Image: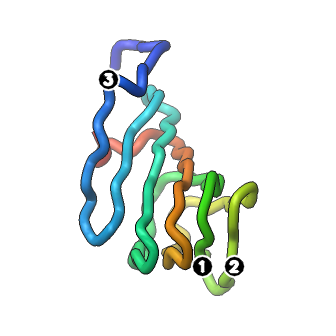
Amino acid sequence: MTIKNYFPGSETTLFDAGGGLTRRVGAHNDNLMVVEVHFEKGTVAARHHHRHEQITYVVSGKFEFTVGDETYVVSAGDSLYKQPDIEHGATCLEAGTLLDVFTPHREDFL
């Protein structure tokens, strides 16, 4: 992968992932990626797992997250950590935006 240092938002597009969820990939390289994720109220991100470490920062809105066997209600300013292969999912209680950071990058998002 060629190293790129600047990722202007004006040059990226929102990808419609369906079911009230859209995302925009930001800066990334082989080892790290940031993704802006928008949820409409009621959107469910089904429980899933992947090999990546993930940190989620809540920019706005209110969400119910399940990570492993624990469930949390989170809102703006809260963050969550998801270790590799842990099952997790979310339900959007109030429309909002999340900022997800993955390591390594999500090839399936590019």
- Residue 90 visible in image: no
CA–CA distance between discs 2 and 3? 34 Å
Residue at the image point whose x is 44% and y is 68% from the top: 49
What is the tally of numbered marks visible in this picture? 3
- Residue type at numbered disc 3: Glu
Q: What's the mark number on residue 11?
A: 3
**Which of the two marks, 2 or 3, is nearer to us in this view?**
3
Coordinates of residue 37 in the picture (x, y in percent): 45, 53
Side of 14 relative to 39 (left or right): left
| Residue 78 position in % (x across, y down) | 74, 60
x, y (%) of residue 19? 28, 71
Q: Amino acid at mark 2?
A: Tyr
Could you say whether the residue bearing mark 2 is in a helix, strand or loop?
A: strand
Say which quadrant the C terminus sits in.
Answer: top left
What is the quadrant of the N terminus in the image?
top left
Q: Residues within 10 Å of mark 1 (few under 14, many from 20)?
A: some
Quickly name the residue at label 1.
Answer: 64
Q: Determine whether 13 is above or below 82 in the image.
A: above
| Residue 66 horizontal/vertical position (percent) | 59, 79
Q: Earlier in the sequence, mark 1 or mark 2?
A: 1
**What's under tag 1, amino acid-wise?**
Glu
What scheme was used to colour the molecule?
rainbow
Under tag 1, what secondary structure?
Answer: strand
Q: Cα distance, mark 1 to mark 2?
A: 6 Å
**Which residue is disc 2 drawn over?**
72
Mark 1 vs 2: CB contact within 8 A: yes
